[in-house]
Image (spheres, rainbow, N blue to C red):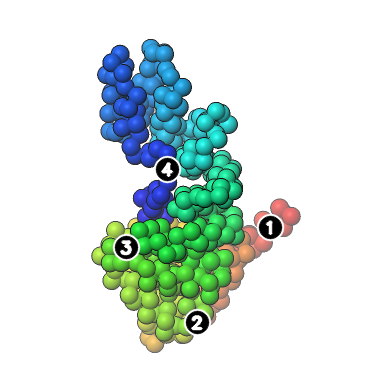
Amino acid sequence: MDTLWVKKKMIGVMSTMDILNLAEHIKEHAEEHNQEDLSVIADEFSLGHFLNVLSKTKMFRGKYVVSKRLAWTLSILEATCYSQVGEGKKAADIIKDLYEGDYKKEVDDIILYGNLAFMCDYKLARKIMSDAVKQIENEESFEPLKAASAYLVLGEAEENLQKFVRAIKYYKRALTFIQNKEQESQMILFLHFKLGALHARNQENDEAITYLQRTLELSTETDVEIRINSLVSLGKMYGSKKDYKKSTMYLKKSIPMLEDSALVNKLVHAEAYTEMAYNYFDQSKFDDAIPYYEKAISIHLKNPNYSARELGMIYMQYAYCLDHKEKSDKQQAGRNYEKAIEQLEKTSERDLLESAIGDVIAFFESTGNYKKKRLYEHKFVKMTNDRATIS
């Protein structure tokens, strides 16, 4: 879900000047005396040599008298380059100057500034796009696609600022402008998916299911990654409602697709296996849960940025399954309980860790392994004392 949307985020944006065509716009300003230098700048930008572009635009400004419109175009180019090389503050300063300057009055330019700001400063993007949508809706006639694009970026800015209720509001507003536009099918698809994902995050399961099911209906065979994410999300939604039949149906559709996609061994792949495992775990079907937990663990361990909390909880459930399956394997269960504590100790959730240690102490007591029991009792006492000292 996290890496799929670079192209989608650009749908319908840059109405005045598409960033991807900046090189061509630069060449439009060429005159006999500066043509060669502008051509070099344009070519360097096309090749993605952003630091070279910044160096050459600086030299260009010092070498020639630059018209107001060419200076504006160069500033757009420079803001884009700074964003691409991780200099967000410099990019944002340029965009703010442009937004507050002489070119602020045109709605198309405001939308452009908002899109540029989205690349480097979400708060600035929110401020600028809020202005854009106000101006658009105050016009007697406006392009619905332009309004939808502005609201989409405004929603994404709010989402990235963790303002999820506002993001939902703006995504829904964007959708009202393009619901029946066949030519904008990708934006419609994207908005339905985003609304489903955000409602799911807010634990508004019924709304999430409605939007995610609609996402599946709107998607085609070429929308592989969005279909996978929607299927996994629906599996999780129905699992949370304890509708295991529907949950399993969606997850079983997603898993073969995952294994044959660019998302193989990514977080969503692990999520699908974990949810399948938990469906069986919650029904006390421990033998059925075990292979799915094993696959989920394997994927997490392949990812350097895995969540220690998530993996720790998976180990806890996996160990419980090993202990309570038809032919109990207490030795393996013990090993995995210890792996769970190793992971949970990496988190800052003391209450969760204390609860897990309590379960591990009970397990080793039940198996007569008093050496391990004392080890974890010592950990528990130390945590309790540390907490008392801090308070």
| Mark linked to residue 15 | 4
Secondary structure under badge 4?
A: loop
Going by the numbered disc 3, the residue's amino acid type is Asp
Per the model, the C-alpha gap separating discs 2 and 3 is 28 Å
Placement of 113 over or under 259, stated as above or below: above
Residue bearing mark 2: 242
Secondary structure under badge 2?
A: loop
Q: Please tell me which of labels 4 and 3 falls first in the chain.
A: 4
Quadrant hosting residue 96: top right
Q: Please tell me which of labels 2 and 1 falls first in the chain.
A: 2
Per the model, the C-alpha gap separating discs 2 and 1 is 37 Å
Q: Please tell me which of labels 1 and 4 falls first in the chain.
A: 4
Q: Residue at x 71, y 53 (%)?
A: 390
Q: Please tell me which of labels 2 and 4 falls first in the chain.
A: 4
In the figure, is residue 331 to the left or right of 130?
left
Foreground mark, 2 or 3, reads 3
Q: Residue at x 48, y 66 (%)?
A: 196
Q: Quadrant of the N terminus?
A: bottom left
Q: Please tell me which of labels 1 and 3 falls first in the chain.
A: 3
